[in-house]
Image: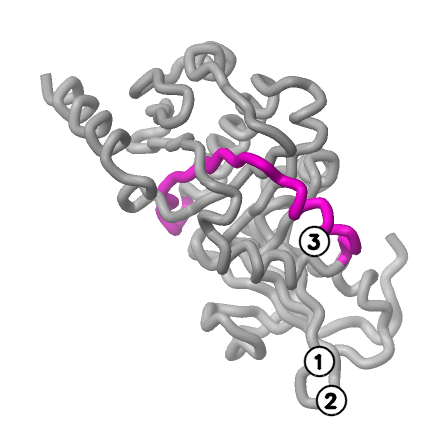
């Protein structure tokens, strides 16, 4: 009876507002044309989940993980314009990002609430599963052309990069971005995206190193942090670039490591 009442309340919330309450961890899927998804097919692909609402423009999935609700809803491409502009700025390795994103005609948002702490890995795997199920439900051409706007990581990426990051780095791959900025005459590389999980982001200063090599190094270290490892040659220090968050400063080797 309590579960049924909670489901009815959630269904009313889904119908009444754009942003689901407390579901502030969001990934926006930008699509090249209007698309329609089948909530029942997505539920069946996931298996073992409760579907709340069957409106293809707005529904939710109650996942097996206790208290985990993942919301899926359509939104205008510019619904999160400020976040999108920030992500376009910091997706530095993708040169054509602005031109490609400008062609988007529709979007779906996948949103959930993350609890910082030991459960983050299971929660992120749940989120990845919903994203993958939604992509599989799209027309193959639309899925291939999809752009993922990972808001907490301040990055946009084509679908092929999302899949590659998941394959090479696991769940942590798409959820962090490495930014390169100049600070007080030196270059700074830092990750963004770990704060909602209760994990420290990473930062490193350098002058002569290849920025791409430093970025890869931080991504590999981020994978270890996500897995709960304690890093050597890392010190808790104040963030060197906004936003304010917990950070670990990494002491880089004088010469690049051999991968």
Start and end of the magenta stretch? 93-118
Residue 168, horizontal then vertical, whole percent: 74, 39
Label 3 secondary element: helix
Q: Earlier in the sequence, mark 1 or mark 3?
A: 3
Q: Is residue 56 visible?
A: yes
**Which image quarter: residue 55?**
top left
Q: Identify the residue position indicated by label 1 in the image.
A: 182
Left or right position of 152 against 4: right
Residue 26 to residue 43: above or below: below
Instruction: Report how far apart the C-alphas of labels 1 and 3 lie in the structure.
Output: 22 Å
Q: Residue at x 61, y 34 (%)?
A: 31
Residue 224 to residue 119: above or below: below
Residue 110, horizontal then vertical, whole percent: 45, 36
Left or right position of 140 against 67: right
Q: Identify the residue position indicated by label 3 in the image.
A: 98
Q: Identify the residue position indicated by label 2 in the image.
A: 185
**Which image quarter: residue 66?**
top left
Tag in front: 3 or 2: 3
Instruction: Report how far apart the C-alphas of labels 2 and 1 lie in the structure.
Output: 6 Å
Q: Residue at x 46, y 69 (%)?
A: 245
Q: Are marks 2 and 1 in contact (CB under 8 Å)?
A: yes
Neighbour tally class for label 3: few under 14, some 14-19, many 20 plus, Cα within 10 Å? some
Q: Residue at x 73, y 40 (%)?
A: 161
């Amino acid at each position: 009876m309590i579960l049924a009442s909670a489901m009815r309340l959630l269904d009313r919330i889904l119908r009444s507002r754009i942003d689901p309450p407390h579901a502030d961890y969001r990934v926006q899927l930008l699509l090249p044309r209007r698309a329609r998804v089948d909530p029942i097919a997505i539920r069946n692909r996931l298996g073992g989940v409760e579907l709340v609402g069957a409106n293809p423009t707005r529904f939710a999935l109650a996942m097996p993980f206790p208290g985990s609700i993942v919301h899926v809803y359509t939104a205008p491409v510019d619904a999160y314009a400020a976040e999108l502009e920030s992500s376009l700025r910091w997706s530095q390795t993708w040169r054509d990002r602005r031109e490609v994103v400008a062609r988007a005609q529709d979007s779906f948002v996948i949103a959930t609430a993350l609890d910082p702490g030991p459960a983050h890995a299971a929660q992120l795997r749940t989120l990845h599963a919903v994203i993958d199920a939604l992509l599989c439900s799209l027309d193959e051409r639309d899925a291939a052309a999809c752009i993922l706007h990972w808001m907490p990581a301040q990055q946009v990426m084509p679908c092929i990069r999302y899949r590659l990051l998941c394959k090479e780095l696991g769940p942590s791959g798409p959820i962090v971005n490495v930014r390169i900025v100049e600070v007080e005459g030196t270059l700074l590389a830092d990750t963004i995206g770990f704060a909602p999980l209760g994990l420290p982001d990473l930062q490193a200063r350098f002058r002569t190193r290849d920025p791409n090599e430093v970025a890869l190094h931080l991504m590999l270290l981020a994978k270890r942090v996500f897995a709960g490892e304690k890093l050597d040659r890392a010190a808790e220090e104040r963030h060197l670039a906004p936003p304010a968050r917990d950070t670990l400063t990494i002491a880089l080797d004088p010469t690049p490591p051999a991968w």
